[in-house]
Image: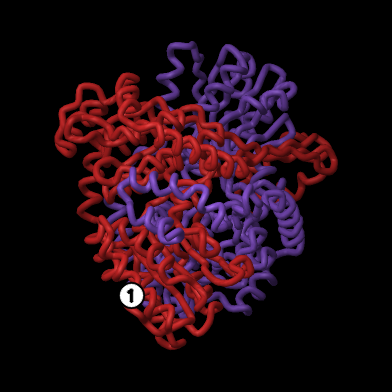
Chain colours: A red, B purple
Amino acid sequence: MKIVELCDKSYKDVLNNLLKRDIEDFYEIDKNIIAILRNVKDFKDKALYDYTFKFDGVKIDNIKVTEDEVKEALDTVDNQFLDILKKAKYNIERFHKRQIEKSWIEHEKKGIILGQLIRPLDRVGIYVPGGTASYPSSVLMNSIPAMIAGVKSIAMVTPPDKRGKVNPNILAAAYIAGIDEIYKVGGAQAIGALAYGTETIKQVQKIVGPGNIYVARAKKEVFGIVDIDMIAGPSEICIIADKNSNPRYIAADLLSQAEHDQFAFLVLFTNSIDLAESVKKEVIKQLDKLERKEIAEKSIGNNGYIFIVDSIDKAIEISNEIAPEHLEIMVDNPFGLISRIKNAGAVFLGSFTPEPVGDYFAGPNHTLPTSGTAKFSSPLGVYDFVKKTSLIYYTKESLKEIKDDVIYFSKIEGLTAHGNSIRVRFE
Amino acid sequence: MKIVELCDKSYKDVLNNLLKRDIEDFYEIDKNIIAILRNVKDFKDKALYDYTFKFDGVKIDNIKVTEDEVKEALDTVDNQFLDILKKAKYNIERFHKRQIEKSWIEHEKKGIILGQLIRPLDRVGIYVPGGTASYPSSVLMNSIPAMIAGVKSIAMVTPPDKRGKVNPNILAAAYIAGIDEIYKVGGAQAIGALAYGTETIKQVQKIVGPGNIYVARAKKEVFGIVDIDMIAGPSEICIIADKNSNPRYIAADLLSQAEHDQFAFLVLFTNSIDLAESVKKEVIKQLDKLERKEIAEKSIGNNGYIFIVDSIDKAIEISNEIAPEHLEIMVDNPFGLISRIKNAGAVFLGSFTPEPVGDYFAGPNHTLPTSGTAKFSSPLGVYDFVKKTSLIYYTKESLKEIKDDVIYFSKIEGLTAHGNSIRVRFE
């Protein structure tokens, strides 16, 4: 954990360096991805079975998960976890229901009617990673907003393990969420199947859910044919704390992101040198007891910073430049600062809202913009699973009143057939 | 104009063929695009001047449009057009103001507070095509929603002509819209400048606006570093009409899209063979009088269809599969069909709402999803220029109540440092 004192001159340099988060060359990966996608498009199911054998090392008879497989999984999952999943589902539903938008239609002057329809997508695909990083919370967070939006058909894809099985916790979460169409296929091939459709997997309109670099690049490649959620980068946490904050809490929260992966991004801003020193000590102390110590140690070494700033104001200003995925604000009266937060995925206020509360339980989505994209994108939400349609109605009289203006405008743009479509109605 | 009778068996084939709208290989183009983007990233302004000389054939002294250039342009534009621009602006503003969303914050049980902030993007770039396709309406449609969202800083880019000038109508529209930061640069190099920033053009957070294939592929390439609106395809119109509809109106409306470019997509669905025949005759008759006859003739030959269907119900069903950019409904009581329209960019209701009314004047945005993407995407709107941030606040008591659940969940996911961030707060 590096402690850096930020004076006004140095901070732009440090920041520019930190913000270089997304510039990488994916040329070789993309070449492979495109080949995989093309094969899936051309050879459909056959390509899926072949790639599953090649990449997951298992020969699968039927990629569709059966009801029996789900039952078997539920038997191995304890009831306590099923209960927790249900409680989490309740909270996630409750929050996301507030995001429902309504269609509207309004009468304007002179018989003109304008409106905006809100309609759910028909069918959505959810990617769920398998292997070591198996996150049942992801199943809930990605499917519940879609269901609340009114999406009728949801397909879940997830890679099988070496025995051809899906992690039972994942299946349990799918069961609680109400997803009954699940396929044992992962990687770029799964993205190809969802984007183009195969004999078994029907094409979807949008693909959401996290994945490794192959999944991320494949999603970017098929974007346009289908919609995608976002290209997720490593986890990020930014904490703003003053001298009254508890260094033990701060250290624990930084480490909770550090254990994700070695490129996780962990930054504390404080105006107290004492706090900085205590947090540093606490990080080292707590690190020793962690199961995933090795990963956490690496991410701290790579991207762990404690910045000492003149004021909390300055901290907010820099945090807005960083646009972190997670922002914890541990100062007296954190609510007083809300109006000045411009860019962040989710904000955790006060000393008793550690970030993991949001990962699993509080209700807001844990799929959040990373790599500075919080400057222009939003948490996954119900709005990601609807689309809008404009409505326009003119009467003959109302059209007559504007006809000369439209005809003139179309002439200026050199599109006289546009003007003609108005003209024929008054000849 | 091909007349096709759709019986139940044939229609899937015809449709599948029509819907193959977006499958193309862009490998060679993309290679060039990536090279251009890299050069802009590395050499900044210098690359912009070099590419402008190479592609636009003009040596420019200063890519920033001066106030004098804007004044000069306004002198050449007639007052009637300025007035029309102002009226269009008023209507566009009026419609888009209804899309403003509000932040919310709610108290849950036991001191828990959850919320969702809505914040505008800081800075946006608008691409405006130059040359033969010069559309001042695009300037209004792309900038007004951003301004209503609260975007403070808007940069417009547009390619110069051979004399190094920008089309005066474009500059007039920018003036009316209130855009005062305009650069004479187009193509992939303009997209690179907006995405990475140069000495002169500050980086933006989102790029919107139509362009040729180079612009479209460059936008796709930089997606992720910045946000983009969409990858626009050729114009599309789908008309649903019954026997009482006026064939002259229908023909004129089909032709208004046909003149856009040779790949425009024009489809009429009707349950009346008589109407089909009359529309075909009218198309041929009106075509002869068009200034852009050559282009319209090509698009009719490429993608002009009249489909005869059993019922208007069937027409709606197929239209939902097509998900057209523009859908005109010319039947008795068009409002009765609204609830069954699932996928369309904008719907034009009745016989006196020809599509060009929406292009220029009515208020809803003319930037609409094409190539079937209306299945999952929306007209450009205020919602494209804001992003959301979740807020979470727990008290010590409320955290205590859920702590065991969160700790258990994190254990299931193998992320024990997540659990630890809760645990430290109660030790």
Residue located beneath label 1 in the image: A281
Which three-letter amino acid code belongs to the residue tagged 1?
Lys
Horizontal side of A251 relative to B154 (left or right) equals: left
> Where is residue B327 drawn, in percent x and y?
61, 33
Q: Which residue is at 66% across, 52% downward?
A: B107
Horizontal side of B411 relative to B318 (left or right) equals: left
Q: Observer-nearest residue: A300 or A200?
A: A300
> Where is residue A152 drawn, in percent x and y?
50, 27
Q: Which residue is at 67% across, 49% downward?
A: B99
Instruction: Locate the C terminus of chain A by quadrant.
Output: top right
Chain letter of mark 1 equals: A
Q: Which residue is at 51% across, 43% downward?
A: A384
Horizontal side of B291 relative to A67 (left or right) equals: right
B23 in relation to A14, above or below: above
Q: Observer-nearest residue: B410 or A194?
A: B410
Horizontal side of A255 relative to B172 (left or right) equals: left
A317 in relation to A89, above or below: below
Instruction: Locate the N terminus of chain A by quadrant.
Output: bottom left
Q: Observer-nearest residue: B162 or B217?
A: B217
Residue A196 visible: no
Residue A284 visible: yes
A256 in relation to A196, above or below: below
**Of all residues shown, which one is farthest toward the front?**
B427
Quadrant location of residue A426? Answer: top right
Count of all numbered marks drawn on residues in the image: 1
> Where is residue B316 drawn, in percent x and y?
58, 23
**Residue density around tag 1, few if under 14, some if 14–19, many if 20 or more, within 10 Å:** some
> Where is residue A325 drawn, in percent x and y?
44, 60
Q: Observer-nearest residue: B117 or A375?
A: B117
Quadrant location of residue A189? Answer: top left
Q: Regarding mark 1 in the picture, which secondary structure is present there? A: helix
